[in-house]
Amino acid sequence: ELGAWEPVLFLHAYGPGTTAWIVFHRAIGALAPHFRCILMDLPNFSKTGPVVYREGVHAVQARTAVALLDALGIERAHWVGCSQGGQSSMVAAISYPDRVRRFVMGGSHIGTGGDRYLMANRPSEGARATQQALDDPSRANIHRYLRVHIDDEALVTDDLVDYIHRAHTWSPEFMEARRQSVSVPHDYTPELASIRAPVLLIHGRYDRMVAFEVSIAILNHVTDSRLVLLNDCGHWPPFEKPAEWAAHVLAFLRGY
């Protein structure tokens, strides 16, 4: 947690060893002077859990995030997500509309379980690399997974690989909870039109996990929406383009 004033809840991307800190830490300094920034690790990531579930994972994550707001005494907040965190923010805007002021998403699917792309391949290169790293979380597979997710390969350092590997493998109990959990597919497309919270979509042009056509589809369904497409950027815009990403998010959250 950093900063003060109006609360903003940050939900991180999917993948082995992902945490809110690693996804957002390069951008959070630009937002903390203006907002109370709360970075939440999602269930079965880092030290949140372990939890075994048999329902749509984004419904689990949205409900857990609302429970955190309840525990902190926060009635409404802005929500900022990347990848799965963005979709869970979208699900919160559908399921708990009174708890969401504005929200940011990108690199996110519409449906739990993924979407049928019109143009891009499925499963995507990012999905295949992620599954390989989940099945066999060796340093080599995690290194490959990160190189697919992040367009600028210079950012995929040994320190980053070590961080992700340690965060994913530190607890046998968490690994077992992830193995036992089942995410039930759900298509949220019919519910997108009910969203009333303003949404900013920020997507990397070279996202090899989720094709940017999905953000265009969301834009077409949500009335109060706008889309930023960042060139030379992969699946983690707040990590890869922190200054530009933070500038767009800051202006949006402040109502500019």
Image (cartoon, rainbow, N blue to C red):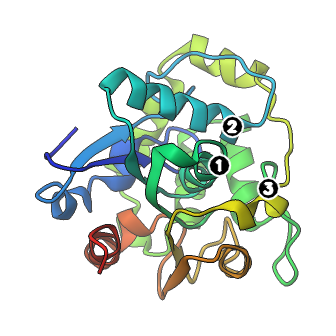
Cβ atoms under marks 3 and 1 closer than 8 Å: yes
Position of 210 with respect to 1 (left or right) is right
Q: What kind of residue is marked 1? A: Val
Marker count (numbered): 3
Cβ atoms under marks 1 and 2 closer than 8 Å: yes
Position of 227 with respect to 135 (left or right) is left
Residue 50 or residue 128, whichever sits in front = 50
Residue 12 or residue 33, whichever sits in front = 33
Q: What kind of residue is marked 3? A: Tyr
Q: Which residue is mark 1?
A: 91
Who's the residue at 30% across and 41% down the image? 38
Q: Which residue is mark 3?
A: 188
Can you see residue 172? yes
Counting residues from the start of the chain, the first of labels 3 and 1 encountered is 1
Q: Position of residue 193 (x, y in %)?
A: 73, 67
The label number, if any, that marks residue 59 in the structure image? 2
Badge 2 local density, few (<14 within 10 Å), some, or many (20+)? many
- Secondary structure under the numbered disc 1 in the rendered image: helix
Residue 50 or residue 96, whichever sits in front = 96
Task: Please identify the quarter of the rendering in which residue 60 is found.
Answer: top right
How far, Cα to Cα, is label 3 from label 2?
11 Å
Q: Is residue 88 above or below residue 134?
A: below
